[in-house]
Image: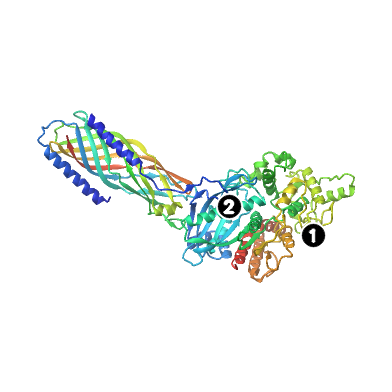
Amino acid sequence: MTLLNLRTLSVSLALIVASLGAASSAIADEAVPNDFRLGSYTVFYRASADDLSGPFVPSGVNFHTDNIETLYVGYVRRLSAHFSAELALGYPPLTKTYGVGPATLGSVPYSGQEISTARWLAPTGFLEYNFFAENAVLRPFIGIGVNYTNFYDRRSTAAGDAGSGGPTKIELPASFGPAVTVGLAYQIAPRWHAYASYSASKVNTRLTSITGGVERTSHLEFNPQALVVSLGYAF
Amino acid sequence: MFNFFKGLAAAAAALTLAACGSSTSTSAISTSTARGTLAVDPPLRIASLNAATFAAELGATTTGAELLALTSAPVCGVDFYYVKFWTVGGANETTESSGALMVPTGAAPTCSGPRPIVLYAHGTDTNQATNIADITNTGNTEGALIAAAFAAQGYIVVAPNYAGYDISTLGYHPYLNAVQNADEMTDILTAARTALPRTLSAATSDNGKLFITGYSEGGYVAMATQRALEAAGKTVTAAAPMSGPYALEAFGDTIFFGGVDLGSTVFSPLLTTSYQHAYGNIYTATTDVFSTQYANGIATLLPSATPIDTIFSEGLLPETALFDSATPTVTIPNDPTQSAELTAALAVPNNPASPFTPLFQLGFGTSYLINNDYRVSYAINAATFVDLAGPLAPSGSPPTLAAIPSAIPSPSLAPAFYLRQAFNTNDLRNPAWAPSAPTLLCGGDADPTVFFSVNTGTMKAFWSDLPAGLVTVLDINGTPGTPLPAFAPLQVAFQASQTALLAYYQSAAGGSLSLAAAEAAVVQGTHTAEAPFCTVAARSFFSQF
């Protein structure tokens, strides 16, 4: 799914939710427990990796991961006037990893090559504190939580296989780590809010690539930061 | 709260689905351990070098540049694969081994499509971790040599690390075990032929021609392999065993009668360990063979992760002293004459006319490896059951206690002394055979490590009644142009390099050695120095077929 398609989908879903909201706008303005949010999720990787180590790997072989943008889906449960719980999800993005280090491994191009791709599902649970009154137009909020990141569809590209020396399996065990968020809610209508938030989470994993029975490893810290801009409907 | 949990449940469902996502596949690990099975399919490509990169990397060092000058610039790129395969050990035990598949690549017509295979066997290596496929290791000079000499010139190269090395868990190396050596070469050839079409270099394929070569221990392995493949009716296009200890019994006799070769203190434990595993009768305790100073732990000493110089400096092996410098007394009951003759034959060599005398004398000392009783027993056995090739005795032929040798140098008949019996069993004259494919035997008559005349010369004599041209013997140190004019440039180049080395050792940069010391230094390096010249001679020989 391309980024354009994702944006189109995100706008379409927002419109559907908006029309549903219009249909029920007659409901009295009261504190409702559920808030469903949809928006865009821009992930800035602050990834750092140890150089790949293992048999027949020259020194200085490293990689970087491109930032991605995807669809944000959030569910927020009101716990009290000031506290809420959020489960934040993103449409699993395709994350591309590029070689960093020697221009070539032997005669095989490496630096700058797209060597692998992976999707991840990273649900993050936050306990959030919302400032001001519930009916305030602007409500800042802060939150702390836990991020779980599960990597899947891990693939070594043809360039990655050539650099590694054959068909390569990539293992990236799931990561648990703390997450924090800070954001602002803007009330558009009694049940409609626009949200902007910035979150950071700690995502550590150990990459193992297996080629021809040989394992190479690297410790990875993705530590993503994410900007979420979303539209929410409370019900 | 109901909705909250419902939301969580939906997320959990999404997670479950996500976890089902697959990652790409990697090589399959074989469940079969049958001989010749490719254990990891496809094999790992350790490195891929195009011709220009390979030339640049070799050219970056002095020795590499010299090698390139000798082998010619690479025409092809080379892909280096790490082949793991199933074979057998010295007691026919199932075991995994590893080695190299080097595949020529590139646009030149000789670099892809159907190409011939060179099956190569490397020389004695004390380093247990040796991996000839690992071109990224700058210490892998033999791997670089065969890649430059063969693969970069359009030959597919297949070369085992040997059981006992690298990933092998065998725990010893079946050193100079003719049956195992040939089995392992055959098995890596089978595995490499399976692997080739599944590699990243599948544009290069096997054209069915098979050339067999190897140096030193590998010369022996190559000849054993040629014999086995020809006996099995398999194609051998041509073979070029180089500087190998083919006539093992005659060579062993030479050494025990005082013609001690350089490296013998390393070769001895490799041999006894190999034959103890294969036959179980070499010793009851290692002290049966070795002096008490060295016997403890010697059965598992080599190959080793510890550098050989450290093994020497730690006193685990003497560097050169194979035998006691105090000559043991031989006592043959009721025969004082022959007792005296044999005792004299075991004395430290002192023939001033022989250029080998200083070398032989290095083989004797006060901290010596082989105990005197064992040496005396061996000598009596050798003098009783005579190898008709005769040892290259340092001071004339030793006395014999049996019939005088006839003209045809055959190995002795089943000597009862077990180490010598193992030499006899693994002597490549036994059982009698002759090559059916054209064969080049290259070596050098100044080789201090694997003596040329007692090994290559003996095989030449053994095959003296074969049709002319079937077996060609090339002395790289011999008269240029003999036996074939085509080899003259290599002979001239080798001899010039030895002369240059002699001058170097006498220069300030080389240590300002005296002439005698410089000559000794040159001789010590001769066995290794011959290798690239003989290897290029082998390629030149193969290119005719």
Residue B413 vs A149, above or below: the answer is below
Query: In front here: A145 or B356?
Result: A145
Query: In front here: B263 or B48?
Result: B48
- Marks 2 and 1 belong to one chain: yes
Coordinates of residue A126 in the picture (x, y in percent) = 27, 34
Dot 1 crowding, Cα within 10 Å, few <14, some 14–19, many 20+: few
Residue B187: mark in rendering: 2
Q: What element carries label 1?
A: loop
Q: Image point 82% across, 50% down: which residue?
A: B384
Q: Can residue B510 be seen in this view?
A: no
Provide the residue designation for mark 1. B353
Q: Is residue B105 left or right of residue A191?
A: right
Amino acid on which disc 2 is placed? Asp
Dot 2 falls on which chain? Answer: B
- Where the N terminus of chain B falls, by quadrant? top left
Residue A27 vs B129, above or below: the answer is above
Coordinates of residue B452 in the picture (x, y in percent) = 71, 59
Q: Image point 89% across, 47% down: which residue?
A: B335
- Where the C terminus of chain B falls, by quadrant? bottom right
Q: Is mark 2 on a helix, strand or loop?
A: helix
Which residue is situated farthest in the left direction here? A26
